[in-house]
Image (cartoon, grey):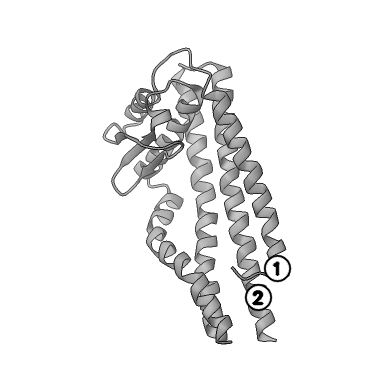
């Protein structure tokens, strides 16, 4: 990585990311030890929620790792980590319901999810090529290469921006589904909100980090142009 004074621009995103991650870890550890009165595992809760919403065909599968939970809109598969799938904790139910929120986004053609899914292949390639192309431009003092690198990295920033409404909306749907089910206490619902709100901060931190990195590339490019 290119080291100079512009590295200071990365500090806000780094600090926010560390703080957000600590909040996620703290919230998850706390509410992973508090179990819902109903006692159903997260997998069963999500299956019931999805069936009520007309999305009973969504596949639910266990996946190794911790907090590796995700919904794949390409295969309509909701994957729950080992600590979530069979757990009836408040944290597990909240995380699983969040992924169910993504499944509903797919079912209802939520535009930001559709856009993010379509952008994944392009952004994946662009983010890998952005830095090599940019630094090739610096090495050869060729502005078009630097501009191309910046443009490719800008795609990653745009992707991080699109991700924000997708994640916030999934959490909103999760909270509504759990509240409407009538099976969870207000205290349990507050715990779910705490976990999901903490997780949302990590996406904000990711966007801020990407945005500041983009600004850094622009400044480095302008300095080379002079």
Q: Position of residue 183 (x, y in %)?
A: 45, 16
Find disc 2 in the rendering and name its residue.
220
81 and 199: which is toward the camera: 81
Say if 223 sits above or below 190 in the image.
Answer: below
108 and 3: which is toward the camera: 3
If the image is split into quadrants, where does the C terminus sit?
A: bottom right
Q: Please say whether residue 147 is visible from this viewpoint.
A: no
Q: Position of residue 178 (x, y in %)?
A: 47, 25
Task: Find the residue positioned furthest to the top.
Answer: 37
Query: Is disc 2 surrounded by few (<14), some (14 to 19) or many (20+) residues within 10 Å?
Result: some
Find disc 1 in the rendering and name its residue.
6
**Where on the picture, by quarter, is residue 103?**
top left
> Tags 2 and 1 in contact by the CB under 8 Å rule?
yes
160 and 139: which is toward the camera: 139
Q: Secondary structure at mark 2?
A: helix
How many numbered marks have been drawn onto this rendered protein structure?
Answer: 2
Going by the image, does 223 lie left or right of 142?
A: right
33 and 210: which is toward the camera: 33
If the image is split into quadrants, where does the N terminus sit?
A: bottom right
The residue depicted at 58 percent of the width and 59 percent of the height is 210
The residue depicted at 66 percent of the width and 85 percent of the height is 225
Q: Secondary structure at mark 1?
A: helix
Going by the image, does 5 lie left or right of 180?
A: right
Q: Please say whether residue 42 is visible from this viewpoint.
A: yes
Q: Position of residue 90 (x, y in %)?
A: 50, 23
Say if 18 sits above or below 196 in the image.
Answer: below
């Amino acid at each position: 990585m290119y080291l100079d004074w512009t590295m200071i621009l990365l500090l806000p995103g780094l600090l926010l990311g560390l703080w957000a991650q600590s909040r996620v870890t703290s919230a998850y550890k706390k509410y992973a030890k508090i179990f819902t009165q109903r006692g159903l595992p997260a997998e069963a809760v999500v299956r019931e929620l999805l069936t009520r919403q007309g999305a009973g065909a969504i596949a639910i599968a266990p996946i190794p790792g911790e907090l590796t939970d995700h919904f794949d809109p390409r295969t309509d598969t909701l994957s729950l980590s080992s600590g979530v799938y069979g757990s009836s904790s408040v944290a597990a139910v909240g995380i699983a319901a969040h992924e169910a929120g993504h499944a509903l986004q797919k079912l209802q053609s939520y535009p930001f999810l559709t856009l993010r899914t379509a952008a994944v292949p392009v952004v994946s390639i662009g983010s890998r090529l952005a830095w090599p192309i940019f630094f090739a431009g610096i090495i050869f003092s060729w502005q078009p290469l630097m501009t191309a690198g910046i443009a490719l990295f800008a795609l990653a920033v745009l992707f991080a921006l699109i991700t924000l409404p997708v994640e916030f909306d999934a959490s909103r749907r999760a909270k509504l589904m759990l509240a409407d089910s009538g099976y969870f206490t207000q205290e349990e619902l507050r715990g779910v909100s705490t976990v999901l709100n903490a997780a949302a901060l990590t996406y904000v931190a990711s966007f801020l980090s990407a945005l500041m990195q983009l600004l850094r590339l622009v400044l480095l490019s302008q300095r080379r142009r002079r």
